[in-house]
């Protein structure tokens, strides 16, 4: 797997290459780039997919500047990655983690052609629901972060209601979850990065200011929401789409928050249509 060294540290990423439309696909806390594995397969060779593993608790290399592992810092890291790889006309795709909205709100956005927000944090839902708030609370005590990561070794804990059992409607393969949780289970420096991020939850004033600035993003935006999602309020989907001058809402049934896991084929079809007809098409 290729790596790239950025200001905060070195991260892994995958890149399918090619000359097609470029998607940069982003995951949430305690996940890595493999969240998008099935969507990437469905998209096929006609789309270039760049999938970084962000320093959100499942990364393999501790950050050299852990103080930068905040919502705004990780959003800036995404922008730095795009520039370092010299990607242009990029469509950002984010699931679960909503902090990438800071990149769009704060800029620069000259390399972005569009954005897809898939069942993600928005408005005041940072962190989302009980699982996200539990991580944020446990982050105040290092021992609790260690304990919560060790409990993730057990299937009953992973699928418990109110926790990861609310993230996906269908079980995530054991080997995938093992890979997601192993770094924070084994490495105190990874847990340090996770704690830093969890403790950086933006204030309500910051979130309101960020939301207000999103309306200045005048490129196409696809908002994909799951009506059965237990963590991202259904009302946030249409409300988020309405923020953007060129926003559009699509709802995908039979899914929870991790739409790339529950409905990869449907999501890939919506992304393909979006980048080929709206992002690559003439402006409205």
Image: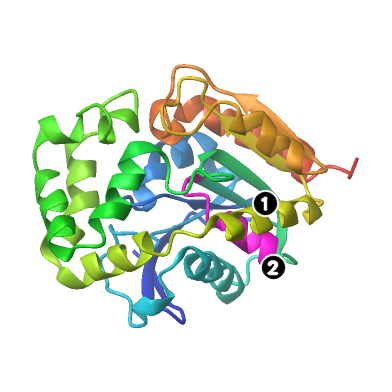
Camera sees residue 88: no
Q: Provide residue 231's location: percent of width, then percent of height.
A: 42, 33
Q: Relative to 163, is 254 above or below?
A: above
Q: Relative to 104, is 263 above or below?
A: above
Q: Earlier in the sequence, mark 1 or mark 2?
A: 2
Is 199 within the magenta? no
Task: Give the residue displayed 30% in from the left and 63% down from the top.
Answer: 194
Q: Secondary structure at mark 1?
A: helix
Q: Provide residue 238's location: percent of width, then percent of height.
A: 67, 29
Q: Relative to 180, is 184 above or below?
A: below
Whether residue 54 sits left or right of residue 116 in the image: it is left
Whether residue 46 sits left or right of residue 1 in the image: it is right
Is 104 within the magenta? yes
Whether residue 209 sits left or right of residue 184 in the image: it is right
Packing grade of label 2 (10 A; few <14, some 14-19, many >=20) is some
Camera sees residue 211: yes
Packing grade of label 1 (10 A; few <14, some 14-19, many >=20) is some
Task: Give the residue displayed 68% in from the left and 60% down from the top.
Answer: 105
Name the residue carrying label 1.
211
Query: Which quadrant of the structure image shows residue 106?
Result: bottom right
Q: Which mark is residue 107?
A: 2
Q: Which mark is residue 179?
A: none
- The stretch of residues the image draws in magenta is 95-107
Q: Residue furthest top?
A: 254
Quadrant placement of the C terminus: top right
Whether residue 146 sits left or right of residue 72 in the image: it is left
Query: Which quadrant of the structure image shows residue 19?
Result: bottom right
Question: Along the line of sight, which residue is nearer the eye, 196 or 226?
Answer: 196
Q: Secondary structure at mark 2?
A: loop
């Amino acid at each position: 797997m290729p790596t790239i060294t950025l200001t905060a540290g070195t991260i892994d990423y995958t890149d399918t290459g090619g000359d097609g439309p470029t998607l940069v696909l982003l995951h949430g806390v305690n996940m890595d780039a493999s969240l998008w594995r099935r969507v990437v397969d469905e998209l096929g060779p006609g789309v270039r997919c760049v999938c970084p593993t962000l320093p959100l608790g499942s990364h393999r290399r501790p950050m050299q500047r852990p103080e930068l592992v905040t919502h705004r810092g990780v959003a800036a890291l995404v922008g730095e990655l795009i520039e370092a790889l010299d990607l242009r006309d990029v469509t950002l795709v984010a699931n679960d983690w909503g902090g990438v909205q800071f990149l769009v709100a704060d800029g620069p956005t000259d390399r972005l052609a569009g954005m897809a927000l898939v069942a993600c944090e928005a408005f005041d839902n940072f962190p989302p629901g009980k699982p996200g708030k539990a991580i944020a609370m446990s982050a105040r005590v290092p021992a609790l972060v260690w304990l919560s990561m060790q409990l993730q070794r057990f299937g009953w804990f992973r699928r418990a209601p109110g926790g990861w059992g609310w993230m996906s409607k269908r079980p995530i393969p054991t080997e995938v979850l093992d890979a997601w949780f192993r770094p924070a289970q084994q490495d105190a420096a990874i847990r340090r990065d996770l704690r830093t991020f969890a403790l950086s939850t933006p204030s309500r004033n910051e979130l309101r200011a960020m939301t207000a600035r999103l309306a200045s993003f005048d490129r196409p935006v696809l908002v994909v929401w799951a009506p059965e999602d237990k963590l991202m309020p259904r009302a946030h989907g249409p409300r988020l789409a309405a923020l953007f001058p060129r926003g559009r809402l699509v709802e995908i049934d039979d899914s929870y928050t991790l739409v790339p896991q529950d409905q990869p084929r449907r999501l890939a079809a919506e992304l393909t249509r979006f980048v080929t007809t709206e992002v690559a098409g003439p402006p409205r």
